[in-house]
Amino acid sequence: IEISPFIADLPKAELHMHLEGSLEPETLIRLAGRNGLKLPYADAEAVRRAYSFDSLQSFLDLFYLGLTVLQTGRDFYDMTAAYLARAARENVRHAEVFLSPQAHVRRGIPIAEVMDNVLAALADAGVRFGMSSGLIVVIQRQFDESDALDMIAAVKPWRDRIVGLGMGGPELGNPPSKFTRAYDVGRCDCGWHTMAHAGEEGGADYVRDALHTLKCERIDHGVRCETDPDLVRELAERGIPLTVCPMSNCMLNVFPDMASHNIRRLHEAGLCITVNSDDPSYFGGYINANFAAIQASLGLADKDLWQMARNGFTSAFISEEQRRIYL
Ligand code: ADE
Ligand code: ZN
């Protein structure tokens, strides 16, 4: 897809990007080699061929397999640095990135190796690219709430360098209300901002649950809110941001194609919509490709894309001084 100069030059904030979903096929192969691991793929092309999904679960299976190449602290540093370098080239000025600590700790990777190296890469990108960033730890919702509480306790030594708590993984059957206590601990004991994946495969009731039971400040995806007009009104009135990921939604059959995506309707309904890449390596495009795709298929004007990019900065978890610099 062609990236217009307007999109390329637009200053952007990316708020929904899983670090583990930024591992490019070439990197998977290289890290597997470096760590002496066997993957069921001969080369990067074979990895790419495997990226054809029919549902969230079919993607998650490959996502959890791919991240097993991450073994050493250096792997976590390199993965984070590679995403930030790419984001800087796409004129991302502020990035809030998701990390799924449970997926690593369960494989026996020491939590300090993960946290220290991801945080070091974020700090270095600040110096090298003049980019600001935030780290969000993400609960894996297929596990129990006690596992989520263990994860929060494990990262608590870094709590002042973590900006928020999120939740990902298979949505259906794992409603936000399963994690009420974990979110209370994150918000009250750790002082974190809160968000959750909701309304991607789950319905509007999951978005309501994230908003009212977990008291989330942002909703990740949230596109299925549309079936509940009262909820859409509440999201608009309260200015609750949705971090929408258009290419992800098409790849995972949330919508059959980009022309059917509801991002334009949600934007025109007055919601605070941001545009993000989710898992850019798996879904075929970084943030600029996501902006270009919605413009090409939905006929959005440059001023609409400008508003969505601006929404990224108004929705970011940054100080008001920092926000004034970006706006
Ligand atoms: N983990 C990584 N990407 C995800 C997504 N789009 N939905 C739920 N969990 C995820
Ligand atoms: Zn996501």
Image (cartoon, rainbow, N blue to C red):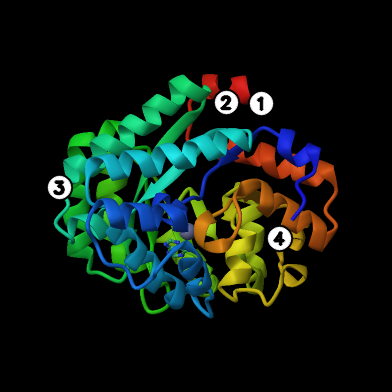
N-term-proximal mark, 3 vs 2: 3
How many marks are shown on the rendered structure? 4
Residue linked to disc 1: 327
Q: Secondary structure at mark 1?
A: loop
Marks 2 and 4, how far apart at CA: 25 Å
Residue linked to disc 3: 110
The kind of residue on which mark 4 rests is: Ile
Residue linked to disc 2: 323
Marks 1 and 4, how far apart at CA: 23 Å
The disc placed on residue 183 is none
Q: Secondary structure at mark 3?
A: loop
N-term-proximal mark, 4 vs 3: 3
Marks 1 and 2, how far apart at CA: 6 Å
Tell me the crowding category of disc 2: few under 14, some 14 to 19, or many 20 or more residues within 10 angstroms, Cα based: some
Mark in front: 4 vs 3: 3
Q: Nearer the viewer, residue 209 or 68?
A: 68
The disc placed on residue 263 is 4
Residue 63 in view, yes or no: yes
Marks 3 and 2, how far apart at CA: 35 Å
Is label 2's Cβ within 8 Å of ligand 2?
no
